[in-house]
């Protein structure tokens, strides 16, 4: 229950470790194993969306929105994930799938970018001090 509560308090992307911290703020007895066991179940039930940005780290996001067509813009340095509505993706998915006689069930568009901080200073605070 603490994990469930922590997930839906999130308004942004989170990793399993971040979720563990948040869940422990609610209930100190939550174990890491339980978080890692529970997340895939949430994903399977469509409560949570997995966001794969091509790194080893998996990000998650509560699946609250009705319109799943979002483009992700990811900072090349700190890997902050921005999401913007991209209704054209629905058209795109339908068009390319129908050419094959198929029906789309999911798609994603990712753009790598520089966040404001990277643009301004050349390095993101989140990455400073890490090697
Ligand atoms: Zn950045």
Image (cartoon, grey):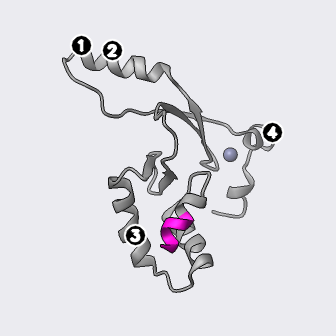
Mark 3 or 2 closer to N-term?
3
Label 3 near ligand 1 (CB < 8 Å): no
Determine if the magenta segment contains residue 3: yes
Q: Quadrant of residue 85?
A: top right
Residue beneath label 1, please? Answer: 99
Label 1 near ligand 1 (CB < 8 Å): no
Q: Nearer the viewer, mark 4 or mark 2?
A: 2
Q: How many marks?
A: 4
Magenta stretch bounds: 1-6
Is 18 displayed left or right of 118 in the figure? left
Residue beneath label 4, please? Answer: 120
Q: Are marks 3 and 2 in contact (CB under 8 Å)?
A: no
Q: Look at the numbered disc 4 and give the secondary structure of its residue.
A: helix
Q: Alpha-carbon neighbours of circle 2 within 10 Å: few (<14), some, or many (≥20)?
A: some
Label 2 near ligand 1 (CB < 8 Å): no
Q: Are marks 4 and 1 in contact (CB under 8 Å)?
A: no
Q: Label 4 vs label 2: CA separation?
A: 39 Å
Residue beneath label 2, please? Answer: 95
Q: Nearer the viewer, mark 4 or mark 1?
A: 1
Give the numbered dot on residue 36.
3
Quadrant in which the C terminus is drawn:
bottom right
Q: Position of residue 40 (x, y in %)?
A: 35, 60
Mark 4 or 2 closer to N-term?
2
**Does 19 appear above or below 107?**
below
Q: Are marks 3 and 1 in contact (CB under 8 Å)?
A: no
Determine if the magenta segment contains residue 48: no
Q: Alpha-carbon neighbours of circle 1 within 10 Å: few (<14), some, or many (≥20)?
A: few
- Between 22 and 16, the residue placed more toward the observer is 22
Q: Label 4 vs label 1: CA separation?
A: 44 Å
Q: What residue is rendered at 75% in x and 55% in y?
A: 125
Q: Look at the numbered disc 2 and give the secondary structure of its residue.
A: helix
Q: Are marks 1 and 2 in contact (CB under 8 Å)?
A: yes
């Amino acid at each position: 229950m603490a994990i469930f509560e922590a997930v839906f308090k999130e308004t942004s992307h989170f990793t399993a470790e971040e979720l563990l911290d948040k869940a422990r703020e609610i209930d100190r007895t939550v174990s890491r194993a339980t978080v890692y066991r529970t997340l895939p179940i949430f994903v399977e039930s469509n409560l949570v969306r997995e966001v794969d940005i091509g790194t080893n780290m998996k990000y998650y996001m509560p699946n609250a929105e009705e319109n799943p067509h979002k483009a992700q813009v990811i900072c090349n340095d700190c890997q902050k994930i921005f999401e913007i509505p991209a209704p054209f993706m629905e058209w795109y998915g339908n068009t390319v799938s129908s050419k094959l006689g198929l029906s789309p069930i999911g798609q994603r568009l990712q753009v790598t970018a520089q966040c404001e901080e990277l643009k301004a200073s050349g390095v993101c605070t989140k990455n400073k001090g890490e090697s």
